[in-house]
Image (cartoon, helix red, strand yellow):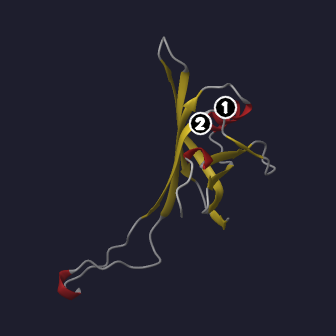
Amino acid sequence: MVAQKGKDLLIKIDMNGSGSFETVAGLRASRITFNAETVDITNLQSTGGWRELLGGTGVRSASISGSGVFLDDATDERARQIFFDGSLPVFQVIIPDFGIVEGPFQITSIEYSGNHDGEAVYDLALASAGALAFTAI
């Protein structure tokens, strides 16, 4: 993958459950992290005392985070409602020249802040809540 513009890493939210995705408004920074827990099967007979892992096991997860300016757009309202309802809608993350990750996520935190001489900003964190699909682009 060659160098890409950070603004092309997009977080999109299904606005009404019908697959109508819109980019979360006002984001200035976004990040997606993939994790895989390991299952350690090291024992006294492990060659040279090296750790051994059991492949194809463990829990996989993804987390999304973003921060931006408060625009009071429809996506801001939708994110707040998702948080307070505790619902698990489908999100998409567009990773330039890589692909699209799509699946259910829970909004685990929303933080609003601002200084007296600046704009209102927010931070958003999401955790995967089911199987994710990847589509190469």
- Residue 112 locus on image (x, y percent): 52, 25
Tell which residue pokes out farthest to the front in this image: 3
Q: 10 Å neighbourhood of mark 2: few (<14), some, or many (≥20)?
A: many
Which residue is more in the foreground, 50 or 24?
24
Q: Residue at x 67, y 46 (%)?
A: 12
Which residue is more in the foreground, 117 or 43?
117
- Residue 24 locus on image (x, y percent): 66, 39
Which residue is more in the foreground, 92 or 7?
7
Q: How many numbered marks have been drawn onto this rendered protein structure?
A: 2
Q: Is residue 45 visible?
A: no
* Disc marking residue 52: none
- Residue 32 locus on image (x, y percent): 52, 52
Q: Earlier in the sequence, mark 1 or mark 2?
A: 2
Mark 1 lies on a secondary structure that is: helix
Tell which residue pokes out farthest to the top in this image: 116
Q: Is residue 36 left or right of residue 92?
A: left
Q: 10 Å neighbourhood of mark 1: few (<14), some, or many (≥20)?
A: some
Q: Residue at x 55, y 46 (%)?
A: 6
Q: Is residue 127 visible?
A: yes
Residue, disc 1: 76
In the figure, 123 relative to 94: above or below? above
In the figure, 103 relative to 44: above or below? above
Q: Residue at x 61, y 26 (%)?
A: 70
User: Please, what is the three-letter code of the amino acid marked with disc 1?
Assistant: Asp
Marks 1 and 2 sit apart, C-alpha to C-alpha, by 10 Å
Which label sits in the foreground, 1 or 2? 2
In the figure, 69 relative to 17: above or below? above
The C terminus: image quadrant: bottom right
Residue, disc 2: 27
User: Please, what is the three-letter code of the amino acid marked with disc 2?
Assistant: Leu
Mark 2 lies on a secondary structure that is: strand
